[in-house]
Amino acid sequence: MKFEPALNKAILIKRYKRFLADVILEDGTTTTIHVANTGAMTGCAQPGDVVWYSTSNNPKRKYPFSWELTQTKAEHFICVNTIRANALAEQAINDGIIGELTGYDTLAREVKYGNENSRIDIMLSDGENPDAFIEVKSVTLLQDGQGYFPDAVTTRGQKHLRELMSIAQSGQRAILLFTVLHTGIKSVHAAAHIDPKYAALLTQAKEAGVEVLSYCADINSRFIELSSNSVPE
């Protein structure tokens, strides 16, 4: 996925109110940009980090700039726009990058399912084999050389695990796909020190037949895409 139009660079001053950040543009002016990320963004928003942002041509937007990537002082690239995760997963599936998810004819997004009023990120079907229900999660938390999910307590994520367990028990394929959007992360673990309930549910989900996949991304200021390199969970 190529960034079009090209991203521009700024320096982060601070992130606040979850959806806003102040940055210094290359011409030295200060402005506020939009942050499409509801998470804690731990380690992804350090003052002085490089911010790569996109520009909207929608005249109705109050903040035309959107934070896409962080380039850390350790030269790691992190995709902080969580909206990108589903699109990257869809592209990788269509391109045959995720070997475990090949062989399907139809891909649908945001399909209603489950007992808790949920929508599955991606559903694959071919009319013959069991459907594949895929929940996509973005992994950006790096601590002590290890990648973790989640970066904050997630009741929504807990609900998704319960829904996936029900799908697996019904005979369909239930898949949790971790998209690793931090170039410094080489493996992913459940963040039991942050959300012990999620970690326990993830263990239960695996035992119930939920498939857990992890794929890392190649990221720079020009493009981002999931690679064929899986990251052990």
Image: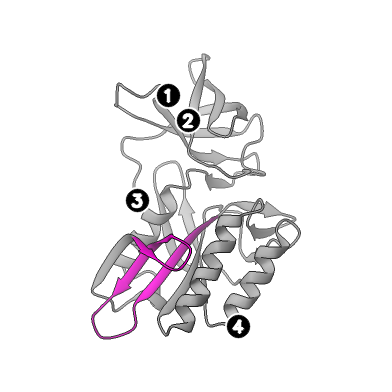
Which amino acid lies under the numbered mark 1 shown in the image of this protein? Tyr
Mark 3 → mark 2, Cα distance in angstroms: 21 Å
Tell me residue 135's x, y (percent).
46, 64
Alpha-carbon span between mark 2 and mark 4: 40 Å
Which residues, given as a range, are shown in magenta? 111-138
- The residue drawn where x is 66% and y is 43% is 43
Which element type, helix, strand or loop, lies under badge 4? Answer: helix
Q: Are marks 1 and 2 in contact (CB under 8 Å)?
A: yes
Reading the image, the residue beneath label 2 is 34
Label 3, label 4: how many angstroms apart (C-alpha)?
35 Å
Secondary structure of the residue carrying numbered label 2: strand
Which residue is labeled 1 in the image?
63
Which of the two residues, 192 or 14, is positioned nearer the viewer here? 192
Q: Amino acid at mark 4?
A: Glu
Q: Where does label 4 land, which residue?
A: 207
194 w.r.t. 56: above or below: below
Is label 1 in a helix, a strand or a loop? loop
Q: Position of residue 176 (x, y in %)?
A: 50, 69
Residue at 39% x, 25% y: name it. Answer: 64
Callout 3 touching callout 2 (CB < 8 Å): no
